[in-house]
Image (tube, helix red, strand yellow):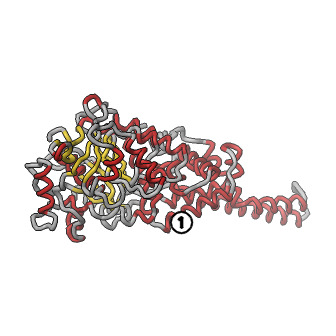
Amino acid sequence: MDGTIFIGGGGENYAEKQGLLLKYANRHGLVAGATGTGKTVTLQIMAENFAAQGVPVFLSDVKGDLSGLAKAGSDGFKLHEAFTSRADKIGFSDYSYDAFPVTFWDLFGDQGHPIRTTVSEMGPLLLARLLELTDAQEGVLNIAFRVADEQGLPLLDLKDLQALLVWVGENGKDLSLRYGNVSTSSVGAIQRALLVLENQGGHKLFGEPALELSDIMRTDTDGRGRISILASDKLMGAPRLYATFLLWLLSELFEELPEVGDPDKPKLVFFFDEAHLLFDDAPKALVDKVEQVARLIRSKGVGVYFVTQNPADVPEDILGQLGNRVQHALRAFTAKDRRALKQAAETYRDNPRFSTEDAIREVGVGEAVTSFLEAKGAPGVVERTLIRPPSSQLGPIEASERRALIDASPIAGKYETVQDRESAYEVLTKRAADAAKAAEEAERLEEEAESVAEREYRAGRRYSGSKVGRSSSRRTSSSGGFGKAVTDVVLKELKGTTGKRIVRGILGSLFKGR
């Protein structure tokens, strides 16, 4: 089905081919259903179809099963006969096994290329969400980012942010006069949250070289889109980190990609698995911004597909933007489940042949209720659909096979070695050292001057001041010494800002184009 992402067969006897039009694939979509109903296989066959038609794909592999996309299925597979039988049933006459170009990524660097961003690129809004900060703590974090932006202090990794927060805490009184209250308790709470994140392995997300978006938007030499697979089985141990990272990536795509209107096919399709993690306990301000990004990013040629157990996991305003839907079975064991089932059924355009609510409850494994956008973007009639079998291997590949593919990747070696160039940590450490040296030199000169004055006094010569004044002066210098020198030096730097204010985008990440 050229120009169509073939999903399966529907209608009477499953003879009618069902699929979403490629030119409407950037209108976003939903893949939903209870555990064990076939969502992962649907995700796999959608990724295959997009890649085959030259569309790069980014998806997260939560269960570790999707690495099989890199290897063709085989006749010896135990489900081979079931697959071929299903292909015959839905009229999939040219069904065959095939492998697809895959790039493996892993935030921890174990099962794929390391994938990183910088603290500055993440931005204060998403970082506050990741650290679960209160409003007051988020305010202090915003002040820290403001100082870093004005000063041109690169915040690349966690030690840069930790160093900046130390300085913010030491100079909270001066900063409070300019930006609002900066309490040491808020700074301490942020530092503790950073320590927890570091213990979870989150520090590996921050640093350089940072991800270049072009590396997840590649096509192969034969014109097929590369499928970027993020290893997420270990990452799911820190669900807030998982959700925040994917949201950051979505915001980067929104900020960096140019407007393309309505292309013939998407520039990238982005699958957000376990989507409920994005919205669980999320403040309304963040949900509103996600809705805004989802609404506007389609004009950048990016299709976003949320994968979750229940459509109710996605806020209604965002759900209303998801025009292409594959709904696997929903369980209705409780009153709450029945309400969710009824609500899900009401979002589809009715088919007179069956009850949508009954169909969502009754479809078997590998079957789904589907609705795709038709001409002029109108929602299609709901249909019971038997999902087509995958061409790639069902289930994961061997660890040795994965390693061979990583080593042969077109970006092999690009992200493996961490770079640690001069950034906020080094700059602030140098400033503190220079200030300490200046304070020591000033104190030495003062002591020498007082020593000379003491000798002159003993010799009976006249000199300005008195012993009381001299003693008071020494006490003031001693108590003000190092801390005052550091404050004076850095505040002098702060007042003489460079004027190169960093512009931040809709979700607080850097707007690099400016």
Q: Nearer the viewer, residue 451 or 47?
A: 47
Q: Nearer the viewer, residue 120 or 48?
A: 48
User: Which residue has dot 1 on it?
Assistant: 196
Percent coordinates x, y for residue 5 in the rendering: 21, 43
Above or below, 322 against 199 in this view is above
Residue found 35% across the figure and 39% down from its top:
348
Above or below, 444 against 248 in this view is below
Q: Residues within 10 Å of mark 1 (few under 14, many from 20)?
A: some
Percent coordinates x, y for residue 429 in the rendering: 56, 60
Determine whether, in the image, residue 64 is placed left or right of residue 476: left
Does the rendering let one see residue 257?
no
Residue found 13% across the figure and 51% down from its top:
89
Residue found 45% across the figure and 63% down from its top:
238
Determine whether, in the image, residue 195 is placed left or right of residue 25: right
Q: Amino acid at mark 1?
A: Val
State the image quarter where residue 481 is shown: bottom right
Quadrant including the C terminus = top left
Above or below, 63 against 173 in this view is below
Percent coordinates x, y for residue 406 in the rendering: 24, 63
Q: Secondary structure at mark 1?
A: helix
Above or below, 261 against 143 in this view is above
Residue at the farthest top position: 376
Percent coordinates x, y for residue 6 in the rendering: 19, 45
